[in-house]
Image: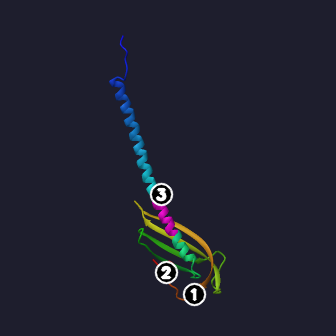
Amino acid sequence: MRDRRGFTLIEVLVAAAVLGIAATALFGLLSKSLFNLRKIEDLHRYELAAQDVMNRVLLLSTLPAPAQAGGALDNIGAHWMVNVQPWAGSSLKDRPEEAVLRIDVVVTWPGRSSQRSIEVEALKAAKVTYSNYDLQRAVENVFPQ
């Protein structure tokens, strides 16, 4: 008998097929992971935008209540909306000089099939103005771009 060294053609073909199937599965998982990573990065970008708008509102020393303002975030293709309301239990009927206000910030952006949004809320004790106050301009001027 001869010494048989090496692999037969069948063994090489089976090993190549197994390797091909494993590589296909791994590349599919890698592709899906990269797609999910992109979605998470986009969501984080919009979350940072909502926090940025909230920080702008929180830096204002005087706020109108109730009030609503909105604008566009051109650099990411989203829109923001700020809603200022007296906090539960507070009433502005007596027109107090200061009050605890609830601030809601909503950032919306177009998704694949529908509008997506993220909401941030906070409470702030602030001076309340009852005259004409341009909340949108005040928010946009906190950090001029």
Query: How would you rate the neighbour count of disc 2 (Cα within 10 Å): few for under 14, some for 14-19, many for 20 or more?
Result: few
Is residue 41 in the magenta section?
Answer: yes
Q: Is residue 45 found inside the magenta-colored segment of the image?
A: yes
Residue furthest left as drawn: 9
Query: Which type of secondary structure does the marked residue at label 3 adopt?
Result: helix
- Amino acid type at circle 2 is Asn
Question: Marks 3 and 2, Cα distance to the nearest angstrom?
Answer: 30 Å
Amino acid beneath label 1? Tyr
C-alpha distance separating marks 1 and 3: 41 Å
Give the mark toward the camera: 1 or 2. Answer: 2
Q: Where's residue 9, x and y in %?
A: 33, 24
Residue at 40 percent of width and 45 percent of height: 28
First in sequence: mark 1 or mark 2? Answer: 1
Q: Amino acid at mark 3?
A: Ile
* Tally of numbered discs: 3
Residue marked by disc 2: 141
Residue 127 is situated, as x and y percent measured from the top left of the image, at 62, 83
Residue 12, quarter of picture? top left
- Horizontal side of residue 11 vs 124, given as left or right: left
Q: Seen from this angle, which residue lies furthest right? A: 89
Indicate the position of residue 34 as horizontal and vertical percent values: 43, 52
* Front residue (pair 42, 135): 42
Q: CA distance from mark 1 to mark 2?
A: 20 Å
Residue at 51% over, 65% down: 47
Residue topped by disc 3 = 40
Magenta-tinted stretch: 40-50
Circle 1 — which element?
Answer: loop
Q: Up-down: is 64 above or below 22?
A: below
Mark 2, secondary structure of its residue: helix
Residue 112, quarter of the rendered image: bottom left
Q: Quadrant of residue 131?
A: bottom right
